[in-house]
């Protein structure tokens, strides 16, 4: 913590870390582009469909009944999403009420922060991973909703996009 700049420089000097970081930046830009072009529900569903086939023990190992149930539920949800998804353009789905968005995102942030703070106590040790996962999901949702709202304003200037809630 006392040598943040030195740590950052050291990380970028590591070849594979720098390559990984560059790949992550490109992936983020593609994700933002997808949010601008497609409905939020489809963009959020794509990463879920990619992760559903991995086992908790990594890339190998047998999946138990719980994992197969989770995969079946995710696949069913994705199928319903595909069947119910209209042909709406991504820009048509970016219309929002600023007050409603701020209220929604404030609620998500409050719940996410409460979950993060609840992990500090010793009573939830066995559920700490689940709580952190839910908190991360909620906070990622906050960023996705904000990006979707900002990219829906393609007819405005860059300054106006950056000034949106």
Image (cartoon, rainbow, N blue to C red):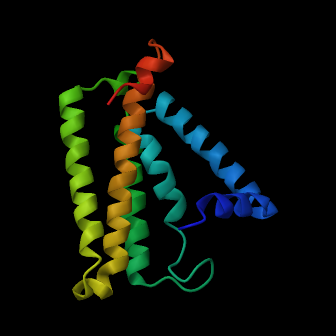
Q: Is residue 17 visible?
A: yes
Question: Seen in the image, is 145 located left or right of residue 118?
Answer: right
Q: Position of residue 59 (x, y in %)?
A: 62, 77
Relative vertical location of residue 147 with respect to residue 95 in this rendering, above or below: below
Q: Position of residue 9 (x, y in %)?
A: 71, 58
Residue drawn where x is 36% and y is 64% of the image: 73
Q: Quadrant of the C terminus?
A: top left
Relative vertical location of residue 10 with respect to residue 27 in this rendering, above or below: below
Q: Is residue 89 visible?
A: no
Residue drawn where x is 50% and y is 82% of the image: 63
Question: Seen in the image, is 70 located left or right of residue 4?
Answer: left
Q: Nearer the viewer, residue 81 or 21?
A: 21
Question: Seen in the image, is 138 located left or right of residue 9?
Answer: left
Q: Quadrant of residue 88?
A: top left
Count of numbered circles on the image: 0
Relative vertical location of residue 102 with respect to residue 46 in this rendering, above or below: above
Residue drawn where x is 18% and y is 39% of the image: 103
Name, please, the residue furthest toward the front.
2
Q: Position of residue 84 (x, y in %)?
A: 34, 39
Q: Position of residue 44 (x, y in %)?
A: 43, 47
């Amino acid at each position: 913590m006392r040598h943040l700049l030195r740590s950052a420089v050291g990380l970028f000097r590591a070849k594979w870390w720098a390559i990984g970081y560059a790949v992550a930046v490109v992936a983020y830009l593609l994700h933002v582009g997808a949010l601008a072009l497609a409905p939020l529900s489809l963009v959020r569903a794509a990463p879920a469909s990619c992760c559903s086939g991995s086992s908790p023990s990594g890339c190998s190992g047998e999946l138990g009944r719980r994992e197969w149930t989770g995969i079946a539920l995710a696949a069913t949800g994705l199928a319903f999403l595909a069947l119910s998804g209209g042909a709406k353009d991504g820009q048509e789905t970016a219309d929002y009420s600023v007050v409603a968005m701020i209220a929604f995102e404030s609620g998500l942030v409050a719940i996410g922060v409460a979950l993060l703070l609840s992990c500090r106590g010793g009573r939830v040790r066995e559920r700490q991973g689940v709580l952190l996962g839910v908190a991360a999901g909620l906070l990622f949702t906050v960023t996705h909703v904000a990006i979707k709202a900002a990219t829906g304003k393609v007819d405005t200037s860059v300054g106006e996009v950056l000034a949106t809630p």
